[in-house]
Amino acid sequence: MSSAERVVIYGPEGIGKSTLASRFPDPLFIDTEGSTSELDVARLPAPKTWNELGDEVIYVASHPKICKTLVIDTADWAERLCIAYICEKYNKPSIEAWNYGKGYVVLKEEFSKLIKILTSINEKGIHVVMTAHAMMRKFERPDESGAYDRWELKLEKKTAPLVKEWSTMLLFANYDIKVVKDENDRAKAHGGERVMYTAHHPCWDAKNRKGMPEVMPFKWESLEPYIDDMSGEKPEIVPEVKEEPKTPPEVEKPAESEPNMVEIPGVEDLKEQDALIDKLHELAGAITDAQIQDAVASKGYYPASVPIESYDPEFIKGVLIDAWPQVEEIIYNKIEQDVPF
């Protein structure tokens, strides 16, 4: 089976992170900062809020054949949307307004929801690429023997570890600058080629599981041998339905003057989905969402980690609601199997 990666590419402004991400197989961009209009790629509308970003990743999770790579460009701008959302939700002027740093805990919990959906997308055989900016911080050695500058993800203190742990491939991009002295003992900078680092170093975080060289030229040709092109047939995850999907699975190439936009469900579509979920909950009674998700996963429709809100509305109606007695039987049979006596 093809191996889909979870890749984080970070580095200083303008080094070419988005361009490298655009070379991944059949990419679909969610451009949170609106800076990739020059790239000839398929894209969803730039999300202006955290909820809009959530709707778009859920849409991709519900339509796994729409792309082979989903690109979130960038993670730090996605985090800004998340911070704005939780500050408005809890009526706080800033992330620092909570006592004892609780705001960062709330941020981590909310950002984890995005990570969970991206994981479910990756489990369907889709590469997920996050780009991010880098920032330099002064690192004090624990033994007080000195300090040095260290490159880190430009994310908050609890979000950055979450993103790093989630990734299967963490790549740090920078310029390879060598300092040499001339005949007058004056230091001069030479070189400046773009490189990517693939292994941990005291001055930056990086990792991979492919046995990649620790440093490579920052270009697609260096990375391509380690990225599956996903040309093999994907396992069918979304169940067949009688009607054709409202959005065609293939994304047309953009016109020269306009970026390609993939339509996502409008307000009426979301209201219809909410009504179906309410109906499902009414039928379920005391049965929890987790039990429904386990039953759905046991039949191979969606992974158990995918929330019901990410299911195709036609699947909710045709498979869950219209055939609820059968679904209920599956759930109760599973409960009986799990009883330890």
Image: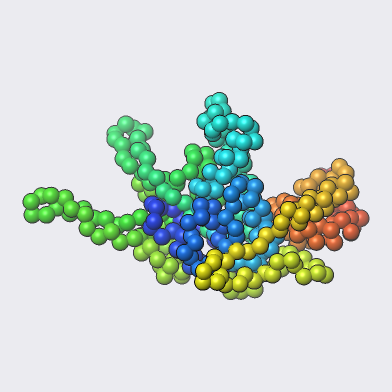
Q: Nearer the viewer, residue 132 or 295?
A: 132
> Quick check: can you spot residue 188?
yes
**If the image is split into quadrants, where does the C terminus sit?**
top right
Which colour scheme appears in the figure? rainbow
**If the image is split into quadrants, where does the N terminus sit?**
bottom right
* Outermost residue, top side: 99
Q: Quadrant of residue 58?
A: bottom right
Q: Which residue sits at x=48%, y=65%?
A: 39
> Quick check: can you spot residue 28?
no
Q: Which residue sits at x=63%, y=58%?
A: 121
Q: Which residue sits at x=89%, y=59%?
A: 323
Q: Residue 105, percent across and down?
A: 57, 35
Q: Residue 74, percent across and down?
A: 50, 52
* Outermost residue, left side: 184
Q: Which residue sits at x=59%, y=52%?
A: 47
- Side (left or right) of 224 relative to 97: left
Q: Residue 73, percent across and down?
A: 51, 55
Q: Quadrant of residue 330?
A: bottom right
Q: Nearer the viewer, residue 14 or 293?
A: 14
- Side (left or right) of 170 relative to 109: left
Q: Residue 263, percent across and down?
A: 66, 62
* Outermost residue, right side: 325
